[in-house]
Image (cartoon, rainbow, N blue to C red):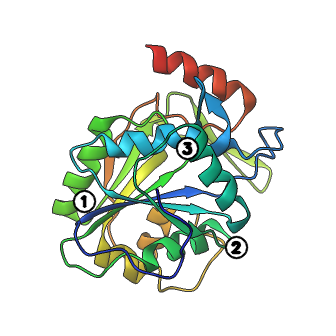
């Protein structure tokens, strides 16, 4: 188990990494405990997410970006649940952008390095999607997991709604995986409020964004009912 150390870099022994961003406060979950620590089938959400990456062929080094105030709480949870998958714990930043940047800062520079960035509360991501994201990013620079919208979509602008073509609308998920040089260069840019995810940061440099097929079960656990849905999906 890793202890908090946001300064020292990781060893240069692996070419695959994942930055798991765990900065949620639990507000929308109506819980005093951040949603990444809530239990699914008796185990914290974040542990399920880590296990999903640990069990893959890519087998990346795991970096958890977490608000400094929750480091001790998380380490205690690891002890209570006998959780021994290795990870590196890094301090979260003011925004998601700054949290990801903190994670990137400890990854060694290597031309062959791939970095996936993943939401801590997407605990149902499949092994197949994770491995596919690394392989596709290795060949094409990046791989952004997404699914087609199942619903009709309308855009509201200046109080006027306009129908959009549903087949052209994709709902973006994580992991979002990049060649290290590409994502590190992108995060040298100053923060901008229009950066909604890592793909938008890379796109700002003029890079092409490549979508790969995700899975509708890859839900983001945000609201109380999502815990029950996740538990049911894990049993399927």
**Around disc 1, counting alpha carbons within 10 Å, would you say few (fewer than 14), some (14 to 19), or many (20 or more)?**
many
Report the front residue among 64 and 226: 64
Quarter of the figure with residue 17: bottom left
Q: Residue 28, how many percent across, how many down?
A: 79, 42
Viewer-side label of 2, 3? 3
Most foreground residue, 144 or 74: 74
Q: What is the spatial separation of the Cα atoms under label 1 and label 2, in whole angstroms?
A: 28 Å
Q: Nearer the viewer, residue 52 or 75?
A: 75
Whether residue 213 sits left or right of residue 218 in the image: it is: left
- Asked if 43 appears above or below 204 in the picture, the reply is above
Q: Secondary structure at mark 1?
A: helix
Q: Give the residue at mark 3.
A: 46
Label 1 sits on residue: 137
Which residue is depicted at the point 53% across and 74% down?
5
Q: Earlier in the sequence, mark 2 or mark 3?
A: 3
Q: Which residue is mark 2?
A: 94
Dots 2 and 3: beta carbons under 8 Å? no
Q: Nearer the viewer, residue 40 or 98?
A: 40
Circles 3 and 1, Cβ within 8 Å, touching? The answer is: no
Residue 181: image location, x then y, percent: 30, 79
Q: Earlier in the sequence, mark 1 or mark 2?
A: 2
Q: Is residue 105 above or below residue 97?
A: below
Mark 3 or 1 closer to N-term?
Answer: 3
Is residue 20 visible from the viewing direction of this image? Answer: yes
Q: Quadrant of the C terminus?
A: top left
- Residue plotted at (37% across, 38% down): 214
Q: Residue at x 41, y 50 (%)?
A: 175
Numbered mark located on residue 182 in the image: none
Residue 109: quadrant of the picture: bottom left
């Amino acid at each position: 188990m890793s202890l908090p150390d946001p300064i020292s870099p990781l060893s240069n022994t692996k070419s695959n990494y994942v930055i798991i961003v765990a900065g949620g406060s639990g507000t929308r979950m109506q819980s005093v405990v951040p949603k990444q620590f809530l239990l699914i089938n008796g185990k914290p959400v974040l542990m399920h997410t880590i296990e999903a990456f640990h069990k893959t062929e890519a087998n990346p080094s795991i970096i958890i970006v977490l608000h400094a105030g929750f480091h001790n709480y998380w380490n205690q949870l690891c002890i209570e649940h006998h959780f021994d998958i290795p990870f590196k714990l890094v301090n979260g930043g003011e925004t998601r952008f700054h949290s990801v940047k903190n994670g990137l800062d400890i990854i060694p520079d290597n031309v062959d390095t791939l970095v996936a960035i993943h939401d801590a509360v997407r605990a149902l991501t499949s092994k197949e999607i994770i491995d596919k994201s690394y392989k596709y990013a290795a060949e094409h620079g990046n791989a952004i997991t997404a699914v087609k919208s199942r619903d009709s979509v309308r855009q509201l602008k200046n109080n006027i709604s306009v129908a959009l073509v549903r087949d052209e609308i994709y709902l973006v998920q994580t992991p979002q995986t990049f060649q290290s040089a590409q994502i590190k260069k992108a995060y040298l840019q100053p923060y901008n409020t229009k950066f909604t995810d890592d793909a938008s940061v890379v796109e700002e440099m003029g890079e092409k964004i490549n979508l790969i097929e995700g899975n509708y079960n890859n839900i983001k656990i945000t609201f109380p009912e999502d815990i029950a849905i996740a538990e049911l999906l894990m049993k399927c």
